Amino acid sequence: MRRTKEDALKTRNTILDAAVELFAEKGVANTSLEQIGKKAKVTRGAIYWHFQNKSEIFDALHERLYQPLAQMIMQDLEQGHHNPLEQLENMCVQLLLDMERDPKKRHAMTVFTSQSNYSGNMSTFRDQHLAKKAESLKLFSKYFEKAKDEKKLSDVADSDLLAQSVCFFMKGIIVEHLNNPDGFDLETNAHKIINQFFKQFK
Amino acid sequence: MRRTKEDALKTRNTILDAAVELFAEKGVANTSLEQIGKKAKVTRGAIYWHFQNKSEIFDALHERLYQPLAQMIMQDLEQGHHNPLEQLENMCVQLLLDMERDPKKRHAMTVFTSQSNYSGNMSTFRDQHLAKKAESLKLFSKYFEKAKDEKKLSDVADSDLLAQSVCFFMKGIIVEHLNNPDGFDLETNAHKIINQFFKQFK
DNA sequence: GACAACAAACATACATGTATGTATGTTTAT
DNA sequence: ATAAACATACATACATGTATGTTTGTTGTC
């Protein structure tokens, strides 16, 4: 049964792909390893070879989601822009559309924005994942700091509160959209609603 | 073991109180009826007397949360206000502070804003609960319609998009706060951040 | 008012299915 | 020959739903 390292990695990713879909659909607690195995066309034995338990699958999926996301924002920040608030506005639209267009991202976002998935054995990851999110919040603050530097925002504005505000809004859109995709079409409305939101900073 | 109707109702509410706390803490799927019974100081037999199954507890808790909430908004709408947008702003602050100050509401909100609780046997309630939320959204639109009537908002503004915007923001605040109460203090910041958000409509 | 019957409101016992983790077996790349 | 990468078998715990037992408020009858 020994496979090449390449094939083993494929199996590992197939398991993760199956898991994220089932986790999004059924919740982590209501998804059994048997179900994941069936969807991935492997047995539980194979899952246990690759992952210690469901928790480790959960954490691997989180890593897969947030690593590229944080990187994307950091790279954006490294590029100069004559108006950092417009830059942030565009980034927000981009984040929404990326998620909308990539089912894996969408499923992962569904899993990790759902508080009750952080229960039972998953609760050990709560603080760790929160800390990663706090890092993203700091990245958003940087856009506001840069806007102050370029005189596009008043010096007395509270960058942290504004960054927090952006996070809340983004979170609200994402959570609501994922809960009810038919209720609000992101492809057609993302730009409009983000643009409306950013009016408060002008 | 027969009790007075009054006492039986007390038992029923004690069960619901215990359930909402455990659901918020552990998620619905990870909370057993045994745990609820222990917390309520009754046995599973008593729970089964009052409720058919966990689903029925779930739905009863939802009713307990949303009924008074919808009523509160409707009553606010019935009161005239010289500026309906300010009225809505105040309502948003009020909703946040009410939730912050009432642990039962907070727990219930935690349960019902967490998508993955709508899995397994609870998934049958998804559409029904979504429909109730859509009603709230319509109530928010009414504030914007009234603002147009009173010339406090441009006639060409899209009331539904703006109402949606408010819902997203409120949802984002609630979800984020419930996930991480230490990350953002609602008592001190609710008014500030809602006020900042409403600047976009002025 | 006393008492018996009934059933509501519980508590306890029983039966069953499911999910997990671990042990063991099999295949095959190196 | 060895061990990685699986598949299968075994052992156990837990949660649910149902059946049955117990307590006691209410009502009707005398």
Image: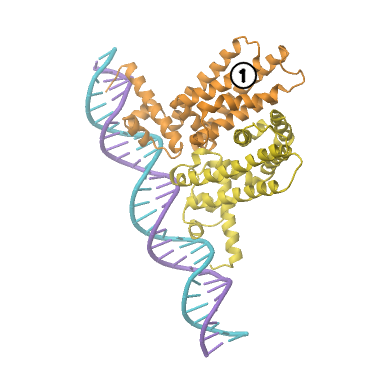
Chain colours: A orange, B yellow, C cyan, D purple
> Residue B185: x, y in percent?
70, 34
Quadrant hosting residue A138: top right
Q: In this view of the protein, which residue sits in the foreground, A119 or A192?
A: A192
Q: Quadrant of the C terminus of chain B?
A: top right
Per the image, label 1 sits on a secondary structure element best described as helix
D11 vs A190, nearest the viewer: A190
- Residue D24, horizontal then vertical, whole percent: 56, 71
Query: Residue B145: which quarter of the image?
Result: top right
Give the side of residue A95 with respect to residue B169, left or right: left
User: In the image shown, does A3 or B94 lie closer to the viewer?
Assistant: B94
Instruction: Name which residue lies at 56% across and 42% down.
Output: B134
Q: Residue furthest top?
A: A80
Rendered location of residue A186, percent (x, y): 52, 28
Q: Is residue B111 visible?
A: no
| Foreground residue among A11 and B109 | B109
Looking at the image, is B73 positioned above or below residue D2? below
What's under tag 1, amino acid-wise? Leu
Q: Residue at x 37, y 24 (%)?
A: A12
Q: Is residue B25 left or right of residue B155?
A: left
Q: Which residue in the protein does label 1 denote?
A: A88
Q: Position of residue B59 (x, y in %)?
A: 52, 50
Q: How packed is label 1: few (under 14 Cα within 10 Å), some, or many (20 or more)?
A: many
Q: Residue at x 50, y 41 (%)?
A: B117
Mark 1, chain letter? A
Q: Is residue A158 visible?
A: yes
